């Protein structure tokens, strides 16, 4: 009973955190709309949704990786490579079916994710080092491939470019695609064993391995998902902006990590949801639009994002400390296990991390 109560309390705490992100978003919109009512116009809302859609797709993929106590810093480079490849395919082979081009972009992202996953999961090299390296390698490949050229809207079919601007019942198609990706990944993480095991891996990798979870395979899958979604984001980027060169997506990886952390996914792994990451992406996009409307220097946008990241990490540590304290109190009320009553004093700290792994599940 005590363990269940502690787990329920932890889940409530993280749910409150995501609710806090939502309230911050609502407050930001209200303040901006009070200064300029046109901020809530249909065109303005549509622009925000279009800008947030690509970041949401990237953030959802990044969430899957961060849950396993890893990180994918190559997301921006993968996006740029997939976007340029998609544009090049249309330019070099006019008449290419759009679904085939989409699959090609996603496939390139999947190959990049496969490379990251293999190096991290099989070679057990820290993800920070691996993906930082692939970030630069893939960016170099992109520059070498493009050789200073760029793909213009005239090189791509109109039906493909319409994907970036079309609406369905007033909602941008890009936003609907991002919502579909979010729904699929969120359902996988919360309702399927392979998804829930990612939380256990992030909470305590050694315990997860001892309990029979295929840690290496799950981490490999996480990077494959992240790379595939970055490839999809590259396709959407090409459709949205129409002009693609080797610099597409430069610096976007930091925005993605910021969105995930601000959205409540613990940078230390084991807790958070794809819903929270999507909220974080929407909040960061809205901050950029709001500061422009409020005529605030763009420098402050970066400062606000940095402050949000620091606050999110600080809240992570506070919630982790409260979880550990709650678990310790629960063990104290339950008393020592009958068969090992004389040895519990030395084992008091174990199990706390595993409980934290169920926060977002």
Image (spheres, rainbow, N blue to C red):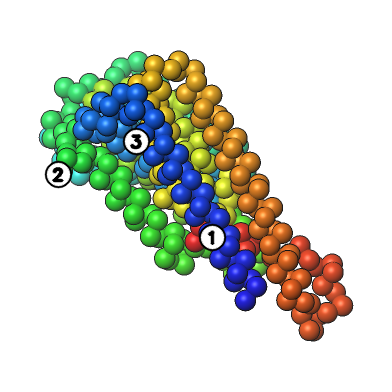
Q: Position of residue 240 (x, y in %)?
A: 25, 30
The one of 249 and 246 positioned closer to us in this rendering = 249
Local SS, label 1: helix
Local SS, label 2: loop
Q: Are marks 2 and 1 in contact (CB under 8 Å)?
A: no
- Looking at the image, the residue that sits furthest to the right is 342
The one of 64 and 104 positioned closer to us in this rendering = 64
Judge the density around disc 2: few (<14), some (14-19), many (≥20) Cα neighbours within 10 Å. few
Q: Earlier in the sequence, mark 2 or mark 3?
A: 3
Q: Which residue is mark 1?
A: 11
Q: Is residue 250 above or below residue 236?
A: above
Q: Residue at x 52, y 63 (%)?
A: 197
Q: Position of residue 301 (x, y in %)?
A: 47, 23
Residue at mark 1 to residue at mark 3: CA–CA distance: 27 Å
Q: Position of residue 360 (x, y in %)?
A: 51, 57
Q: Which residue is mark 3?
A: 52
Q: Position of residue 271 (x, y in %)?
A: 55, 54
| Residue 227 marker | none
The answer to whether residue 152 of the structure is visible from this angle is yes
Q: Which residue is mark 2?
A: 169
Q: In the displayed structure, does residue 62 sit left or right of residue 209? A: left
Q: Residue at x 53, y 59 (%)?
A: 12
Q: Residue at x 60, y 69 (%)?
A: 5
Q: Is residue 103 above or below residue 299?
A: below
Judge the density around disc 1: few (<14), some (14-19), many (≥20) Cα neighbours within 10 Å. some
């Amino acid at each position: 009973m005590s363990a269940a109560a502690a787990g329920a309390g932890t889940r409530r705490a993280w749910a409150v955190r995501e609710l806090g992100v939502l309230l911050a978003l609502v407050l930001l919109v209200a303040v901006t709309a009070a200064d300029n009512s046109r901020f809530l116009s249909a065109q303005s809302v549509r622009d925000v949704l279009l800008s947030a859609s690509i970041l949401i797709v990237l953030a959802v993929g990044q969430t899957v990786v961060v849950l396993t106590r890893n990180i994918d810093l190559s997301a921006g480079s993968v996006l740029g490579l997939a976007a340029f490849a998609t544009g090049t395919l249309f330019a070099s082979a006019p008449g290419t079916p759009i679904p085939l081009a989409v699959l090609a972009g996603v496939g390139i992202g999947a190959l990049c994710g496969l490379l990251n996953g293999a190096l991290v999961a099989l070679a057990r090299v820290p993800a920070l080092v691996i993906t930082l390296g692939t970030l630069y390698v893939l960016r170099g490949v992109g520059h070498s491939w493009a050789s200073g050229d760029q793909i213009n809207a005239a090189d791509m079919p109109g039906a493909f470019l319409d994907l970036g601007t079309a609406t369905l019942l007033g909602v941008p198609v890009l936003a609907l695609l991002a919502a579909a990706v979010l729904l699929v990944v969120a359902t996988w993480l919360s309702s399927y064993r392979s998804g829930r095991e990612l939380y256990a891996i992030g909470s305590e990798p050694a315990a997860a391995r001892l309990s029979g979870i295929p840690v290496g395979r799950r981490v490999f899958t996480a990077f494959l998902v992240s790379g595939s979604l970055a490839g999809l984001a590259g396709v959407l980027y090409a459709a949205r902006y129409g002009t693609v060169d080797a610099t597409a997506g430069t610096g976007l990886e930091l925005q993605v990590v910021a969105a995930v952390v601000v959205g409540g996914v613990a940078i230390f792994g084991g807790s958070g949801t794809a819903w929270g990451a999507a909220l974080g992406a929407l909040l960061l996009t809205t901050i950029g639009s709001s500061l422009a409307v409020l005529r605030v220097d763009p420098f402050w946008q970066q400062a606000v994002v940095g402050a949000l990241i620091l606050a999110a990490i600080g809240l992570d540590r506070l919630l982790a400390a409260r979880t550990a304290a709650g678990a310790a109190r629960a063990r104290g009320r339950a008393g020592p296990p009958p068969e090992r009553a004389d040895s519990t004093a030395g084992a008091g700290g174990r199990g706390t991390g595993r409980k934290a792994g169920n926060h977002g599940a």
